[in-house]
């Protein structure tokens, strides 16, 4: 029986030449840190013969590192995961022979890049010969839905991660909250990026949905979560101040129907990614998000998650205290110091809400543009 998006996998993760780069290998790192799927081998010839625990001990995996797909096969993988996140989302040319080797061996290929493996004639031919499956994570929903506003009538509390920039830890913050909640509270995660979808097994690839339909696609994902869930955590994307990525952020901001916001920021980042624009002051970022939602569906920022990796522990604790004092918003580093404190605050805020649909918004469905 072929694997589906929700199947348990035994991954060989392709991270050739990038394993130790947290940006280039963010898909590999995210899956190793948070996925419930098994990782049986990692492919990076630079570290062949070592184990993941030797190279990246904080990821909590101890899989062997090998030089090729052929070497990985002896560990019994079901799937090859393309673990890199290259600029522009293109498959590196040096990866082609690894992917062909996996398909020829009958392995499922799981791909989070913008470039679709299934659209490549050579890959498709190889998959057809061997019967191998291909899961291109970034294929958008087939149905194009206009945002309706129905999400604003949900009884569940919706928490959205927003950020001062792209790649500041929005997915990580949501996953740490979900992990901390455990079984004590019914929590659902809405993944909106390729790595989050790989970890959760489902979601919407927000950066691949036509702009007019993004809010509707996100709304549909939220509405599809079980009504038994008390809290829905929505993975954020991009940043409203970033000229290249603001569009996807706004689609999430309005489409998910957020009740509460969690702001994420990487300490030490001075310029918005790929630009010469300064990262705005945290207080200004908070004000902007809250003001943009005020006339639609107010959603206060109730927590700040800092990535303090560039600081020593004492400096990190001092900065956390300074940010909390200056903004008036509870602040912590959910990876370094755990998410328990911020989760308790979010849970308290969520349970204090008395939700009601904004007057007039649901009176008629929003027409097509």
Image: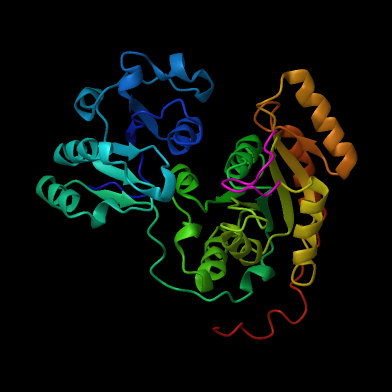
Magenta extent: 268-278
Q: How many marks?
A: 0
335 in relation to 65, above or below: below
53 and 274: which one is in front?
274
87 in relation to 26, above or below: below
- The prevailing secondary structure element of the residues shown in magenta is loop
Q: Residue at x 77, y 59 (%)?
A: 288
Query: Residue 181 falls in which quadrant of the image?
Result: top right
112 and 200: which one is in front?
112
Q: Is residue 294 left or right of residue 82?
A: right
170 part of magenta stretch: no
Give the percent coordinates (x, y) of residue 356. 77, 69
Q: Residue at x 50, y 25 (%)?
A: 59
Specify the color scheme. rainbow
84 in relation to 242, above or below: above
Give the percent coordinates (x, y) of residue 366. 61, 82
């Amino acid at each position: 029986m072929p694997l589906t998006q929700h199947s348990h996998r035994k991954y060989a993760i392709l991270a050739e030449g990038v394993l130790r780069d947290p940006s280039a290998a963010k898909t590999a790192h995210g899956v190793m840190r948070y996925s419930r799927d098994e990782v049986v081998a990692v492919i990076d010839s630079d570290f062949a013969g070592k184990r993941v625990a030797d190279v990246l001990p904080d990821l909590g995996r101890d899989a062997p590192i090998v030089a090729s797909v052929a070497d990985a096969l002896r560990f019994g993988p079901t799937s090859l995961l393309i673990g890199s996140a290259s600029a522009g989302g293109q498959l590196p040319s040096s990866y082609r022979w690894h992917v062909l080797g996996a398909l020829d061996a009958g392995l499922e290929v799981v791909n989070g890049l913008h470039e679709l493996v299934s659209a490549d004639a050579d890959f498709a031919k190889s998959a057809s010969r061997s019967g191998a499956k291909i899961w291109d994570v970034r294929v958008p929903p087939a149905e194009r839905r206009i945002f309706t506003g129905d999400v604003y009538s949900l009884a569940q509390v919706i928490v959205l991660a927003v950020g001062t920039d792209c790649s500041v830890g929005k997915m990580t913050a949501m996953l740490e909250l979900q992990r901390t909640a455990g079984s004590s509270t019914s929590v659902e995660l809405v993944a909106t990026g390729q790595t989050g979808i790989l970890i959760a097994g489902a979601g919407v690839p927000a950066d691949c949905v036509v702009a007019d339909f993004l809010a509707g696609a996100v709304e549909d994902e939220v509405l599809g979560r079980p009504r038994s869930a008390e809290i829905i955590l929505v993975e954020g994307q991009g940043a409203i101040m970033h000229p290249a990525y603001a569009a996807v952020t706004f689609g999430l901001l309005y489409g998910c129907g957020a009740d509460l916001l969690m702001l994420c920021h990487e300490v030490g980042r001075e310029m918005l990614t790929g630009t010469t624009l300064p990262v705005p002051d945290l207080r200004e970022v908070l004000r902007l998000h809250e003001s943009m939602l005020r006339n639609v569906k107010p959603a206060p920022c109730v927590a700040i998650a800092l990535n303090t990796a560039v600081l020593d522990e004492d400096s990190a604790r001092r900065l956390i205290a300074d940010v909390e004092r200056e903004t008036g918003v509870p602040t912590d580093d959910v990876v370094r110091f755990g998410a328990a404190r911020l989760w308790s605050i979010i849970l308290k805020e969520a349970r204090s809400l008395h939700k009601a649909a904004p007057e007039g918004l649901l009176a008629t469905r929003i027409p097509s543009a």
